[in-house]
Amino acid sequence: MSLTERTTDIRSPGMDTRTPEQRRRIMQAVKSKDTKPEMIVRRLLHRMGYRYRLHRKDLPGKPDIAFVSRRKAIFVHGCFWHGHGCSKGRLPKSRLDYWKPKLDENMRRDRMKQEQLRSLGWKVLVVWQCETGDIDALAARLQYFVDESENSIDI
Ligand SMILES: [Zn+2]
């Protein structure tokens, strides 16, 4: 009697092994309803079969998404508020004296929280709002981040 008849699904890190049908369902799920970046990432991860915790207060920075046993955390950042270097992250032209310190402080705090997490042995991934438009690329990146176990990730 065989113990299992399931074929083992060994995925190489970074490889998208999904069928077009699976991918289509992921795309549909992601496109529906709430389009906030964090919801896009959460829904995508869920559809990919991952389970995670949200906004764990006992972790530095209360990461948007945490894989506790894997010690991996994901922050989904709005490009403006967290000072991304893309077109959405540009500083406003007016009231720079108001915005600049505010946004600088956000970025400083982000860096600090990520460093704290790393010093606790966590790996950290930042997903920017502007990166949530390309679902295929995002799915591949998330899968790589969550599944990889040996190599370190440079952000
Ligand atoms: Zn951006």
Image (tube, rainbow, N blue to C red):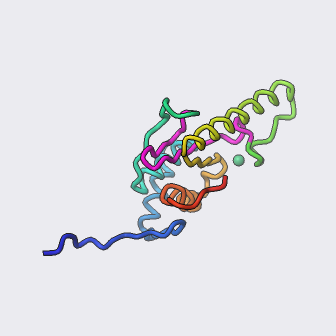
Spot occupied by residue 114 in the image (x, y as percentages of width and height)? 63, 40
Spot occupied by residue 104 in the image (x, y as percentages of width and height)? 77, 33
Q: Is residue 138 magenta?
A: no
Quadrant position of residue 35: top right
Classify residue 74 as left or right of residue 19.
Answer: right
Kindly give the residue lying farthest to the top in the view shown: 98
Toward the viewer: 60 or 87?
60
Range of magenta residues: 62-83
Residue at image location 53% in from the left, 61% down from the top: 150
Classify residue 15 as left or right of residue 132.
Answer: left
Spot occupied by residue 130 in the image (x, y as percentages of width and height)? 67, 49
Quadrant position of residue 11: bottom left
Classify residue 111 as left or right of residue 140.
Answer: right
Residue at image location 76% in from the left, 27% down from the top: 102
Toward the viewer: 3 or 38?
3
Looking at the rendered image, the quarter that the N terminus falls into is: bottom left
Toward the viewer: 61 or 40?
61
Q: Is residue 65 magenta?
A: yes
Residue at image location 40% in from the left, 70% down from the top: 10
Quick check: 16 above or below 74?
A: below
Toward the viewer: 151 or 21?
151
